[in-house]
Image: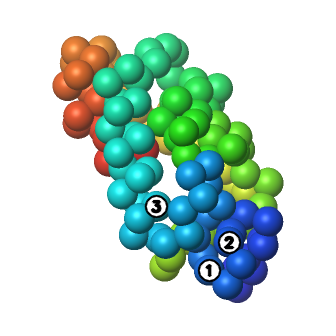
């Protein structure tokens, strides 16, 4: 399936997501996103593992970067060479992922350890 860029989400002539900082260079945006993520990682919201909580976490991490942080996408998108899940499958696939996670293993970790070990997932 071919993906079409939805122009309202990208800066003209680029594949760089529009962002709150107005950064139009992907490498600079990646660094900005990473810095914001690292700052927010220290205060990650705890809660029950659910779709709503994952949306809360996404918003928490990316609220400084994107207006749409924490929202379920309604359009197909990609970033560089990475294609994101088709919007019609996001909620179902997230729920399947949630169902495979062993909560008993997660609760054994303190908050900092959990954040460090799982930072690549977000």
The disc label shown at residue 29, or none: 3
Q: Is residue 15 above or below residue 59?
A: below
Q: Secondary structure at mark 3?
A: helix
Residue 48 percent coordinates (x, y) = 51, 15
Q: Quadrant of the C terminus?
A: top left
Using residue 20 as the reference point, say whether residue 57 is left or right of it. left
| Circle 1/circle 2 CB separation < 8 Å | yes
Where 47 falls versus 19 (above or below)? above
* Residue 56 in which image quadrant: top right
Q: Where is the N terminus found, in terms of image quarters?
A: bottom right
Q: Decide if residue 66 is on the left or right side of residue 99.
A: right
Q: Which residue is mark 2?
A: 11
Residue 14 tag number: 1
- Residue name at image x 23 percent, y 22 percent: 112
- Looking at marks 1 and 3 on the same chain, the residue that comes earlier in the sequence is marked by 1
Query: Circles 1 and 3: CB distance less than 8 Å?
Result: no
Relative placement, left or right, of 68 versus 75 is left
3D distance between C-alphas at marks 1 and 3: 12 Å
Q: Residues within 10 Å of mark 2 (few under 14, many from 20)?
A: some
């Amino acid at each position: 399936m071919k993906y079409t860029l939805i122009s309202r989400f990208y800066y003209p002539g680029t594949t760089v997501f529009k962002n709150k900082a107005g950064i139009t260079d992907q490498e600079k945006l990646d660094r900005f996103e990473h810095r914001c993520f690292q700052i927010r990682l220290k205060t990650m919201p705890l809660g029950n593992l659910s779709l709503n909580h994952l949306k809360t976490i996404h918003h928490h991490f990316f609220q400084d970067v994107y207006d749409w942080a924490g929202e379920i996408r309604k359009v197909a998108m990609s970033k560089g060479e990475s294609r994101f899940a088709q919007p019609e499958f996001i909620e179902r696939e997230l729920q399947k992922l949630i169902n495979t996670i062993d909560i008993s293993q997660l609760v054994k970790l303190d908050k900092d350890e959990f954040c460090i070990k799982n930072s690549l997932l977000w």
